[in-house]
Image: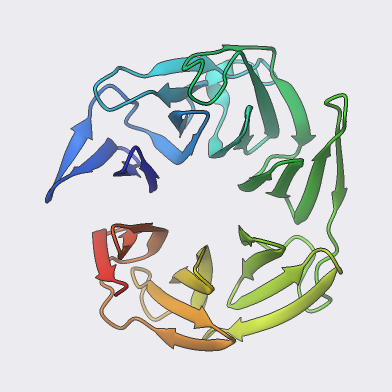
Amino acid sequence: MVVFQDTLWAACFGEGLFYKDGHQWQSYREASRYLTDLATGAGSLWYATWMEGVIGRIADKKTPPKTIPLPRFVTPRFAYRTECIAVHGKRVWVGSHSHLMVLTLQGWEPGIHPDFLYEEWEMALMGGASAIVPTKDGAWVVAEGLWRLTIGEKGSLSFKPVPLPSALPQNSPLAIALAGTILWVGTGATIWKYEFSSGQWHQEARLPQSENVKVLLPYRGRVYVGSTPGKKAKSAGEGHVGLLERSHWRWFREVQVGAVADLAVFEGSLWIAGSEGVQSLSLE
């Protein structure tokens, strides 16, 4: 889920793209049905597709999307199993099971040029990527561990692995989110705070072993956490949402959406997407 042009948008794999219109959800029928992720940036809403060989860009809900073919690092192109997309400034980052790719937009300026041309794709990392948090000078990437990618003055990419705490396997599945100078990291049933200016790790919370951290959402000094069932869960359909504030943890008991897939803040409420639907909780 993302907020674009003061509207909440949600992708439902197999069903397509939807946006909130008052008290109802409307279908944006022109997009692919098999979407894996959404992002906003460069004046557009972006989506990643599953094994269709393209990403999509939407200018507004009344305009059909424009699709951009993925590069031919994989043949055939539709073999890409794309997992995530992120946008910052003039760069669009796309992660699949096999590659991390970056596209630099040309000709786009905020409020000046609503459209753009684009150059050739660049492969940033082999081995795939399951999560991307872009920054002004690069990106944080989950790809069999945690990586820091930086962009040089001439546009060259460099990357290095980020050492994880000794308590975690180096290739642990990770959920990541950025808040100022802190990178929040979730893996398994634990939540960590990485102060990257000093390289210090701090474990902030340990959830029951029945939980598996899926998504982190920092917001106004708090971190909202969505989980999916872990290895010791009683039911494969259970999922929960909790709040971490100043190292104190509490659950939202009223959440009933199945395994949590995503979180978003919209119009003073926390929106929760899961395997069984979408729910909102007031933050006031």
Tell me if 226 is positioned left or right of 157 in this view.
left
Residue 112 can be seen in this image: yes
Whole-percent x and y of residue 137? 76, 40
Q: Residue 20's quadrant in the figure?
A: top left
Q: Nearer the viewer, residue 55 or 51?
A: 55
Residue 232 can be seen in this image: no
**Color scheme of the displayed model:** rainbow
Whole-percent x and y of residue 234? 39, 81
Measured along the vertical axis of the image, is residue 175 above or below residue 254?
Answer: above
Whole-percent x and y of residue 79? 56, 24
For image coordinates 25% across by 40% down, the residue present is 19
Tell me if 263 is positioned left or right of 8 in this view.
right
User: Which quarter of the figure is the C terminus placed in?
Assistant: bottom left
Measured along the vertical axis of the image, is residue 69 above or below residue 161?
Answer: above
Which residue, as the protein is rendered here, is positioned at the far left? Answer: 23
For image coordinates 87% across by 33% down, the residue present is 152
For image coordinates 78% across by 79% down, the residue present is 167
**Marker count (numbered):** 0
Whole-percent x and y of residue 111? 48, 23
Q: Nearer the viewer, residue 146 or 111?
A: 111
Q: Nearer the viewer, residue 202 or 52?
A: 202
Q: Nearer the viewer, residue 195 or 213?
A: 195
Q: Residue 116's quadrant in the figure?
A: top right
Measured along the vertical axis of the image, is residue 240 above or below residue 51?
Answer: below
Measured along the vertical axis of the image, is residue 99 above or below residue 206?
Answer: above
Tell me if 167 is positioned left or right of 238 in this view.
right
